[in-house]
Image (tube, coloured by chain):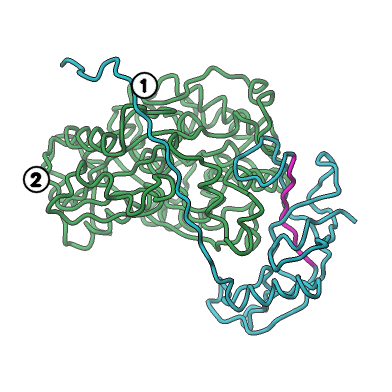
Chain colours: A green, B cyan
């Protein structure tokens, strides 16, 4: 893959309810932060990819809510419906095509403005499934139970993910939910759908992220050190939940294998310094770590107990606090990439992973981890 | 810089998207639903290439990317592969909690069907349970013509 880098990142704070901001206001904030971060202005942006979802926004062609505020006038702008990691993938592809030297990628949602249960129920097949009333929480709860059954991962180990991530969020000024929790706090929180307690679940949040990707030539012109994209892959599993073994993230294993191979990573547990992954629910952190081969199958819970993934452990996972501490869907995956960029530049302030050179960001699209996109980033070219 | 909006009452506009849809079920789903409605039989389609039987039936095998030509009767009895019990009254739920969902792999099928579990104490549900379909008395050609699956 030809060399490309991330040269600017901008994020809004993640909040439960951004009452004063429209989608366009969020984009304006994030885009300007990204441009300032890169030391660029809008004339330096060759094309734009926005990422949003019409159901979440309550408007079709949802790109158009943010296009003006993202500088799309007179430019080539397109929209990816799905997680921010997939939007960034498309933005990167436009660079690699040779047609564009810089791409601005944005991703947003305001979960506060709709009803997430109804929106996610709409992902279910209208003829065979939708009337049953399952949504993202009950679907993922089913997956959590299957994962725990197969691997022996315990409720306490799930709870520890929540304790770690909410705890990390105390040092991230953009996080929505910094909290000082114990395992018992999580286990005693309201059971939403077995086995997921309230504190096993991410909140539904508002937020926006913007990122500027550049080819090698353009990357070297801008003020901050670029963060290089060493490997990217995505892979999709089948649609119907019953077609898959929900307790295994097969498509993530494949995406990770490809991305790591591109980046020359043979031992992910040792070769990576920081991971920001898609922890929409506690069990997902453990399941995705196993699928990526960072933990052996069934071992992520025990690795977590041994402190491996703590911010001062061997391989910090979600030092930002992750999605458990604030989850604006769509923006979520782009923020994972953005957080890794911060770490590799040494810009993560109080939640900095010391000496981080190489990091992995992962995002999810579809129900119960149907599709995954894995990014490997490196401070060094 | 002075914030001219400071202390201003935030205005909220409430609306709703109410769009009726009429989705044709298509030949494959229609055949499946009619068999349930009229005969209380559960059918699957089979891929010629990998021989997997899909329930609910699909025209296309997702892994082989082929046409599923064969139709197969599957049992109304199967094994529970995954489940959850909804405890909070989430907005999409059509009835009062607790509601038990499950993925049931029926005998003869290679994929699991998403449906409800009924006539069971939520605390007693276990992965691996044998369950059987209970059909609704009044059937309309919908997935809810199966009322739920119950342990046997």
Chain of the residue under the numbered disc 2 shown in the image = A
Point out the image quarter for the N terminus of chain A.
Answer: bottom left
Q: Residue at x 56, y 50 (%)?
A: A121
Question: Is A299 displayed left or right of A358 in the figure?
Answer: right
In-image side of A140 versus B1 (left or right): right
Contact flag, marks 2 and 1 (Cβ < 8 Å): no
Number of numbered discs: 2
Q: Please rate how many residues cluster around mark 2, counting C-alpha atoms within 10 Å: few if below 14, some from 14 to 19, many from 20.
A: few
Residue at left offset 57%, top offset 61%: A126
Residue pointed to by mark 2: A43
Can see residue B53? yes
Residue A186 to residue B152: above or below? above
| Label 1: which secondary element | loop
Q: Which mark is residue A173?
A: 1
The stretch in magenta equals B98-106
A180 in the magenta segment: no
Above or below: residue A271 compared with residue A318: below
């Amino acid at each position: 893959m030809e060399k490309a880098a991330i040269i600017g990142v901008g994020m809004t704070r993640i909040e439960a309810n951004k009452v004063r901001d429209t989608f366009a206001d969020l984009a304006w904030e994030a885009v300007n932060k990204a441009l300032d971060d890169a030391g660029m202005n809008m004339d330096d942006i060759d094309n734009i990819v926005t990422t949003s979802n019409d159901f979440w926004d309550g408007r079709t062609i949802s790109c158009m809510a943010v296009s003006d505020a993202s500088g799309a006038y007179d430019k080539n702008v397109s929209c990816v419906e799905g997680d921010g990691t997939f939007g960034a993938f498309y933005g990167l592809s436009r660079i690699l095509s040779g047609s564009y030297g810089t791409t601005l990628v944005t991703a947003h949602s305001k979960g506060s403005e709709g009803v997430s249960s109804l929106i996610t129920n709409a992902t279910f097949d209208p003829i065979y499934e939708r009337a049953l009333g399952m949504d993202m929480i009950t679907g993922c709860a089913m997956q959590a139970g299957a994962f725990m059954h197969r691997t022996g991962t315990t409720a306490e180990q799930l709870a520890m993910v929540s304790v770690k991530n909410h705890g990390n969020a105390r040092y991230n000024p953009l996080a929505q939910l910094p909290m000082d929790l114990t395992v018992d706090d999580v286990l005693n929180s309201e059971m939403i759908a077995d086995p997921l307690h309230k504190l096993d679940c991410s909140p539904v949040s508002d937020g926006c992220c913007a990122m500027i990707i550049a080819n090698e030539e353009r990357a070297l012109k801008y003020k901050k050190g670029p963060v290089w994209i060493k490997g990217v892959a995505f892979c999709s599993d089948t649609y119907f939940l019953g077609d898959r073994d929900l307790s295994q993230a097969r498509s993530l294993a494949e995406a990770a294998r490809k991305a790591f191979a591109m980046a020359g990573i043979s031992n992910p547990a040792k070769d990576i310094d920081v991971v920001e992954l898609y922890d929409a629910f506690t069990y997902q952190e453990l399941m995705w770590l196993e699928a990526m081969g960072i933990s052996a199958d069934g071992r992520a819970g025990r690795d977590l107990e041994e402190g491996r993934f703590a911010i001062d452990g061997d391989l910090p996972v979600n030092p930002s606090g992750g999605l458990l501490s604030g989850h604006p869907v769509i923006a979520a995956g782009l923020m994972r990439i953005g957080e890794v960029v911060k770490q590799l530049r040494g810009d993560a302030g109080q939640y900095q992973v010391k000496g981080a050179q190489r990091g992995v960001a992962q995002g999810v699209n579809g129900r119960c981890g149907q599709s995954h996109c894995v990014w490997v980033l490196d401070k060094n070219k | 810089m002075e914030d001219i909006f400071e202390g201003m009452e935030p205005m909220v506009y409430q609306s709703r998207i109410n769009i009726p849809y009429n989705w044709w079920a298509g030949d494959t789903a229609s055949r499946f639903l009619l068999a349930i409605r009229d005969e209380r039989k559960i059918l699957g389609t089979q891929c010629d290439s990998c021989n997997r039987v899909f329930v609910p039936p699909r025209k296309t095998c997702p892994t082989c990317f082929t046409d599923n030509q064969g139709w197969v009767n599957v049992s109304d009895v199967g094994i529970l592969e995954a489940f959850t019990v909804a405890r909070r009254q989430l907005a999409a739920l059509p009835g009062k909690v607790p509601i038990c969902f499950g993925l049931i792999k029926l005998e003869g099928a290679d994929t699991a069907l998403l449906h409800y579990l009924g006539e069971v104490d939520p605390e007693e549900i276990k992965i691996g349970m044998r369950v059987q379909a209970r059909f609704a008395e009044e059937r309309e050609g919908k997935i809810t013509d199966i009322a739920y699956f119950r342990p046997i």
